[in-house]
Image: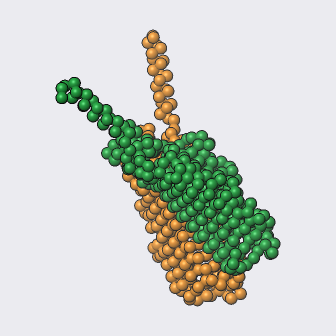
Chain colours: A green, B orange
Amino acid sequence: MNIRNLLFALAIVFFSTASMSGTSLLSHTWVSGSGSDTNPCTFASPCATFAGALAKTTAGGIITAKDAGDFGAVYINQSVTIDGNNLGSITYAGSSSGSVISITATTANVTVQNLTINGLSITGYGINIGGSGTVIVDHCRIMDVTADGIYYTGAGNLTVDNSRIEHLDASGINGVEISGNAEQNVVVRNTVIDASPSTNINNGFVVDGSARSVTASLQNVIIENAGYAAVESMIGVTEITSSVLTQSWTGVYAWDGATISVASSMITANNNGVCSGASSKVRLDNNDIYDNTTAIGNCDGIVKTSTTNKVSGTIAIPAADISESVTF
Amino acid sequence: MKIRDIVLTSVAVLFFTASISASTIAHTWVSGSGSDANACTFASPCATFAGALAKTSAGGLITAKDAGDFGTVNISQSVTIDGSNLGSITSTSTIIIIITGTGNVTLQNLTINGLGTATDGIDVTSGGIVTVDNCRIMNIKTIGISLAGTGNLTVENSRIESLSETNAYGIYVDSNAAENVVVRDTVIDASPISAINFGFYVDSGTGPVQASLQNVTIMGAGGYAVYSGGGVTEFTSSVFTQSNYGVVAENGSTISVASSLITANTTGVCSEASSKIRLDNNDIYDNTTAIDNCGGIVKTSGTNKVSGTIAIPAADISESVTF
């Protein structure tokens, strides 16, 4: 090999190495408050933002906060886990139609965990989920938004666990909104939704959108201070257990043909405890329904009760619309 | 450029810089090695929550970057303070955190220790929407968390303990205005039982108080684990135990208790004149007196299980699903 060929070979090695280090992806990337997005996002050389790290993370990989930091709004279009490690946060002053976290991945598994998400009373959505697949929000605090805490229009499954959604800083918005036109399965568990201020006409949890198959299951959830309804559904079936729906305009509101079942829960201190609109159904079993101005409102729909509910206050619905049965 | 112009320009630059340094940012940081002379950025964090708050825009966030003792703070704007499970406040000041105004205030992941000298842990007054999440409040003389005036208080995943003086309260609601309270997944240890202390206490004011408590354990109260002197309070999936009194309603208040344990108290349940306690699906065991004759109404469903003395007249106990 002469000198010229040697130099040529070295140049090829150099360029191919540069090319690899520039575009190769890692399955586990890291962000740090003192990181830089020009780094490769390794533990030793972490990035500064979730968006910067995501660009260097393989599909299905994980991004972890190495230490405290504010890691920036992120648009997710692949399978990934983002773990704030209970140290990471995102504060983001976006538009009223914008999102702190936006997920549009298709046929994907996306998990967001251990993260504080703050819209600074400016950004619209905390987490805006489209696309399809499975999305899990676990141990997140979502606050100070002007649209919804979580807005789900994706196709597939959404699970919200161990989280808090609070400070809905505009009227006509929701803690969690299940919407769109796709088939959806939703689980919310161990979660607090504070829809305050109640002067805003807001829902804690709502199912709306086009007619379609939607199932929602809520367990050990507390929803408070909704200026409209703690739980409202217009479509599909929603089941609630071991939960508290309180201090709202309406506790449980089914209409437009929706079915809501509530078991072993408290529906208390609302203006209307339960309201079932025309062609809709609310099932009540083993609940404590106290201190509402109207316990069960006359909303033209059906309320089916077992004999195990305990109720104080006015029951305004005609007796014919209340059936007591174990088969319902 | 003449000398005079240079001087004027320099003065202008100086004032401009000063004005920038006084502006606020949405996300500020504190650190155990910070300084309040810093800008409170991540790279240049402050030393105290109070110092950071002065540089945080309304609705912003203050985060503990690492471990530290970040000092008392007086909050009169919307803000979230996040101790990151690393931050603490130890203080002998009278009140450790004061929250006033109508803002959204969240305190999370923080340990607050009054060293047996501070009178109150967190005092909330005047109309705010306040959340206390994942905080430990301890070694306080008189009140762990106080809500006075109109307001909306949510406490979750927290622990209040070591009330160091008699006539102390874990959570105190003054009941003089419209007050909405939610407490969830929280422990209030009002011990020592030798002190006349109270776990969750709604005073006998005139305001429409609504309180809802889920999965709360209150123990060791030498006074009452739970007392309400006004409005409506509901409990579910909770435990009231090892206290002098478990649940006490007075002054026209209503307390509802469902799916809970009221155990090992001197008196389990006491409803004073003109007051009402609803009991559904509870286990009321091992109290010296299960239900005392305190002159008020106790309404029970057929699903409570009770051991021990029921001293209230049978006429004051109604079994009904409509109550």
B42 sits to left or right of B147: left
Q: Residue B118: where, in percent of width, then height?
A: 46, 59
- Say if B209 sits above or below B239 in the image: above
- Say if B245 sits above or below B91 in the image: below
Q: Residue A258: where, in percent of width, then height?
A: 70, 63
Q: Which residue is drawn at 68% across and 76% down?
A: A309
From this viewpoint, which residue is outermost toward the top? B2
- Say if A312 sits above or below A169 in the image: below
Q: Residue B36: where, in percent of width, then height?
A: 42, 42
Would you identify the image quadrant in which residue B151 lies? Answer: bottom right
Would you identify the image quadrant in which residue B131 lies? Answer: bottom right
The reply to whether residue A262 is visible in this rendering is yes
B93 sits to left or right of A119: left
Q: Which residue is drawn at 51% across and 35% down?
A: B23
Q: Residue B245: where, in percent of width, then height?
A: 55, 78
Q: Which of A146 and A5 is in front in this view?
A: A5
Q: Considering the image in quadrants, where does the C terminus of chain B appear? A: bottom right
The reply to whether residue A314 is visible in this rendering is no
